[in-house]
Image (spheres, helix red, strand yellow):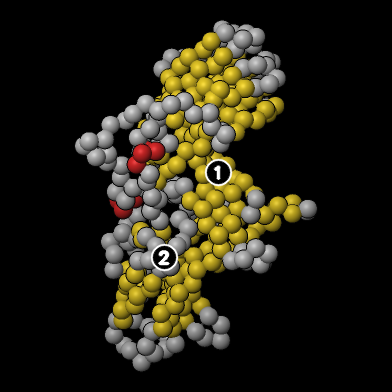
Amino acid sequence: MGNLQQQCRGTGTTELELNRKDAIFVPNEILTGTVSYLKHADAFVVLTGAIYFKKRKKTGLEKCEVTFFTVEYPLKSNHSKSQQFQLQLDDRLPPSFNEPETYPSISYTVKLVYKKAKEQIHSSIPIRVCPHVQIDRPLLLTPLFFGPIENHQTGIKLDVKVNRAIFTFDDIIQMYYELQNPNQEFIHKTEISLGIYYTIESNVSQEDVCTGFESFENTALDNKLIRNKALLNIPEKIYLPPTYKFQYGRDGERSSFNLMIDYKIQFRIYFGNEHTMWQVDIPIILCNETIQPRDNEMPVESEKIISNDADSTNKIVS
């Protein structure tokens, strides 16, 4: 996980400490640590995973919190010296993302809890969970083509070639795109960015991850044919999760939820009166594995694919 380990060092309190130097784990791992001493006889260590999201209601947005994972380790009550503990992670857990208790986010926390009249959290340590995403090597090494996708209002068509469909963090997305403009509609500018989409219980939250760099300045044009190259540098940030799908509980249960994390290359084309924007989204996959093609593997040109996964929408921007 490379840079992730450099960014998330293991932490501890005066009483609770993890044995790992980094605080990043994969599903099905065993987390171990030490409790140095107990102030009270009845105590335990617990690891919890919680999701925070906003659900749309008739009256507005409601803040929701669901604890989807809990595992405890009881501590010996008559034990004055330090105690070791271990906690087993499930074999399938969603990735941590965003800061704890922000919306949306998923966070995991190790806590030292004392049992009194009411349970009290005395110490806590946040950890990160990063599940691995399987890489399909043939798909990885094959350039992908999207289009032509047409804007029926103007007749503008967009063709995009992407160097591949699967990327890692700190990778570079290379694109060649072509705009066919038969009616010579005045195109003010084209913006290219990478967006992350969190879909939780049909509620979508979107954030831009990075913006693109083009090979020449994209000024206002009314040519019939516009061609350009663009690059997107994917950042390697600890709060960015890989592409992922996860379901917790059964449909209809109060605490159940469905989670999808998707990444899309976003083309925003401004034309006409400059306030009219046409957006085309191209899905890609981000993983946290190191991509190292075999020696005998070389990128190959593929036949043109007209993708039904790309999504285009017309939006009026004020």
Q: Which mark is residue 197?
A: 1
Q: What amino acid does circle 2 point to? A: Asp
**Whether residue 165 is visible:** yes
- 264 shown above or below 19: above
- 108 shown above or below 312: below
Mark 1 touching mark 2, by CB under 8 A?
no
Query: In the image, residue 181 lies at what x, y percent?
Result: 60, 12
The residue depicted at 59 percent of the width and 66 percent of the height is 249
Query: In the image, residue 170 lies at what x, y percent?
Result: 35, 39
Q: Earlier in the sequence, mark 1 or mark 2?
A: 2
The residue depicted at 47 percent of the width and 81 percent of the height is 114
Query: In the image, residue 211 lies at what x, y percent?
Result: 47, 30
Query: In the image, residue 243 lies at what x, y percent?
Result: 47, 47
Which residue, as the protein is rendered here, is positioned at the far front? Answer: 303
Mark 2 surroundings within 10 Å by alpha-carbon count, few (fewer than 14), some (14 through 19), many (20 or more): few
Which residue, as the protein is rendered here, is positioned at the far left? Answer: 295
Question: Which quadrant of the figure has residue 67?
Answer: bottom right
